[in-house]
Image (cartoon, rainbow, N blue to C red):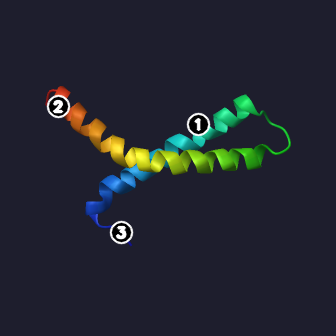
Amino acid sequence: MKIDKKYRGIIFSCLAAVFISVPIAFIMVIINYGFRAGFIIAFLKSALAGTAISVPLANVFIPWAEKITNKIVEE
């Protein structure tokens, strides 16, 4: 089952947010907490918070960034 192409921007923004925020959360937990007992829980909490923050932000700012880029880059 495919999703209608009118939702492409929203799906792209959400996936971009997840693909960026989860690895960042992983690295930040390693830096700040290290590999020790409780790492997985700390990582999951961080990844969930990061995704919850980045999904709405990506849905607002990725389209803006695309519009600005289209204005300043020659075709």
Residue at horizontal 31 percent and vertical 61 percent from the top: 7
**Disc 3 target residue:** 2
Q: Residues within 10 Å of mark 1 (few under 14, many from 20)?
A: some
**Rounded to the nearest whole Å, what is the CA distance between mark 2 and mark 3?**
32 Å
Q: Secondary structure at mark 3?
A: loop
Q: Is residue 75 left or right of residue 64?
A: left
- Residue type highlighted by circle 3: Lys
**Disc 2 target residue:** 71
Q: Residues within 10 Å of mark 2 (few under 14, many from 20)?
A: few
Which residue extends farthest right? 37
Q: Quadrant of the C terminus?
A: top left
- Residue type highlighted by circle 2: Lys
Q: Residues within 10 Å of mark 3 (few under 14, many from 20)?
A: few
Mark 2 touches mark 1? (CB < 8 Å): no
Q: Secondary structure at mark 2?
A: helix
Residue at horizontal 40 percent and vertical 45 percent from the top: 58
Mark 3 touches mark 1? (CB < 8 Å): no
